[in-house]
Amino acid sequence: MLIVDKEGILIRYNVKMEKSMTPEEAAAELYPKEELYKPIAEAIFEGEEDDVIEGLEAAIAAGKDPIALIDDALMVGMKVVTDLYDQGVIFLPNVMMSADAMLDGIEFCKSQSTETPVQKGKVVCMVAEGDVHDIGKSIVAALLRANGYEVIDLGRDVPSAEALAAVKEHEPLMMTGTALMTTTMYAFKEVNDLLVESGITMPFACGGGAVNQDFVSTYSLGVYGEEAADAPKMADAILAGADIAALRAKFHNH
Amino acid sequence: MAIKRFTSMAYSEADEMVFGNAKLPVKAGLDLEIGAGYTTAEVNYAPRPEAGESMEKLVNEYQRITKDIMARMVQVGFPSVVLETEHVQQMTNNPSWGAAVAHAQKTIMEEYHEEYGIKCALRHTPGDIREHKEFMQLRGDKMAVVMESFEQIAESGADLLSIESMGGKEIFDYAVLRNDVPGMLYAIGCLGTMDMDYLWQEISSVAQKKGVVSAGDTDCAQANTAMFIAGGLLDKNLAHTLAILARAISAPRSLAAYEAGAVGPGKDCGYENIIVKAISGMPMSFEGKTSTCAHSDVMGNLIMQCCDLWSNESVEYHGEFGGTTVQCWSESLNYDCALMNTALKSGNEKILRDLLMASDRFRDPQSYVLAYDNAYAVGEAIVKDGEDIFLRAKNAAIACCDTLNNADGLEMTKFELGALAKATAELDAITSESETFMSECMERFSKEVPVFKPENYAL
């Protein structure tokens, strides 16, 4: 059997560029200093739901407001996770597990108060009609929630009329559409046309599988997202005042 | 058809495996023999989206595609070709549509065969439509539609029957996003295999009744999902060591088709097919550097090492500078086959196989494990407990981890090594009792994954 030294044939750039700091060391630098918040942030980073609740109970017992804890502890802990993901220090499954823990924490805080927390904004997530592949949508929804957005998850195989009705009802700052197949992505155009006919000008962020920038650029509300991680960045940009043209300028890279 | 598990290897050693030769060649279509001493291109394509509006438009689109491919084959002088039509959902949901397309394509292929003598075969792959909006429905009404589709395409000209089945995916999608190794083992190794057993006995019966070939499946829904999420070297969505773990577990799952009556060639996007070929001795289709039109991978040369059919995965039909996409890609595929066939004829096949393998061996943990020598070792671990679907999947996962833990010359990141160490420890901690594992997983995932319906697996 022929074995040839890899020198000059390939380079594992991920090994070459790897950061020297471990994820735990990097996270330790970002945790909040406040004694009651730090264990909650650590538990979020570790994805340990039970420890999150335990930390919240301790903070509430010490007099902290449950609803304020969402922003002051849970979201701060989650930001450690999403920042390290953006920096390439940790990977997606860590974000997913942390998001699960954070959501449990939010539900717990809500159950301890009569007040309703205020979130950054609403985003509707859908999978194109005829398409049952929803792992991409699940990732997008988790990353949006991890960044403080309320997600209205319409699920998979969503009829265009249902998407329109959800947008009218919830008035989100944007809607995301994912599709795996070239044949189902055409539904995005139909959704776009229904939205436009109703006078809606909200960005419709689309991506996944065979979806490409050229196709998404053919309908007026379309903004192409190459990565699931683009979704919260688009939402942040919209909150900062970006319109569809500005979003396309920022996210259409090809 | 009865299930007959593999408990031994078809090849006595890894070095015996080469491209273009299988222990059990398959005759199909118009004078084609697959794995019988030569390789053949398998061209795959998707209609333009607007073609799905009606049956007439679809038939017309596939006629254009078929004519384009066959014309280019004879223009450049290639001796054989396989066409694969992966159904758009309309073609499976309306079995007469799929049948009309198969008939139209086969008519053109027969004309070219008659006029030029080109050896060819038509593979049809209905979509796995066995689901409702909220959850999978693997048994019942939708299964009946899938089987009706197989019946009609087999009557109408399809020579090779395949599907990319989805059993276990509802658990896998949940598990893979949480680095959940026992969940992946349960999803692919147990639930996936159980569904394969059920589905492929039925498909093989149809094939036998209609006199066509029950060809094979791929774990596209799970192992390829892991591979695509893992992405390139700099992507941060899944450790590549976990992606190859999913791939290793998918080998005994895809093997189940051949235990239920399928005879090959296996489906192109089953990168696990190298392990399946080592065990079954049946011809396999592969894709790699010539499927970049559909997706990237990190083993484009290596995966060609032992192919019998060489595919481009899929390309949307439209114009390019060099002709239509199907003309361009069919020509590229067949030039690769011409090189492999030259190597075979001149006795240099092992040299070319090793050059292909060596060029990607150290590119990634995925390519390292799928190098034919390491893939063979995973195969040996599977057949050791071939009768027990849980144990053989667990063995495959452990063999994959062992291969990487003892890798010589492969560089891995701390993250990849960390994920590997965690997976190795988790596998060590899993019971060896099949019933215990199954019942624990059943209880756990029934709670954690609302769309999991045990009745899909007769549980």
Image (cartoon, coloured by chain):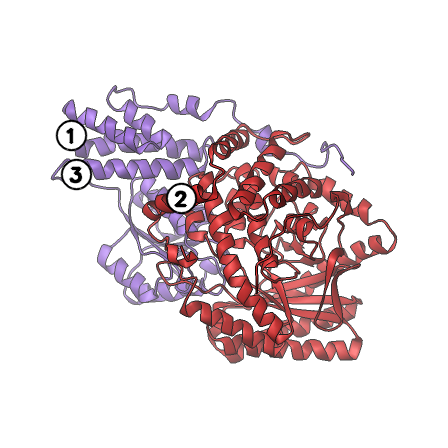
Chain colours: A purple, B red
Q: Position of residue A197 (x, y in %)?
A: 30, 67
> Where residue A111 is drawn, which disc sits there?
3
Label 2 vs label 3: CA separation? 30 Å
In terms of depth relative to the viewer, which is nearer, A68 or B268? B268
Q: Position of residue A226 (x, y in %)?
A: 47, 49
- Residue drawn at (60%, 70%), measured in percent from left and top? B207
Compared with B416, B193 (above or below) is: below
Mark 3 element type: helix
In terms of depth relative to the viewer, which is nearer, A45 or B31? B31
Chain identifier of the residue bearing label 3 in the image: A
Q: Position of residue B440 (x, y in %)?
A: 39, 42
> Where residue B441 is drawn, which disc sits there?
2
Q: Quadrant of the C terminus of chain B?
A: bottom left
Which of pointers 3 and 1 lies earlier in the amino acid sequence?
1
Chain identifier of the residue bearing label 1 in the image: A
Residue B51 visible from this viewpoint:
no
Compared with A92, B332 (above or below) is: below
- Residue drawn at (78%, 70%), measured in percent from left and top? B75
Query: In the rendered structure, which amino acid carries the disc numbered 1?
Result: Asp
Q: Quadrant of the N terminus of chain B?
A: bottom right
Let me know if marks 1 and 2 both belong to one chain: no
Label 3 vs label 1: CA separation? 12 Å
Residue at which label 1 appears: A65
Query: In the rendered structure, which amino acid carries the disc numbered 3?
Result: Ser
Left or right of A152: which side holds B96?
Answer: right
Query: Which is closer to the viewer, label 3 or label 1?
Result: 3
Query: Which is closer to the viewer, label 2 or label 3?
Result: 2
Mark 1 element type: loop
Query: Which is closer to the viewer, label 1 or label 2?
Result: 2
Compared with B114, B20 (above or below) is: above
In terms of depth relative to the viewer, which is nearer, A147 or A23? A23
Left or right of B108: which side holds A210?
Answer: left
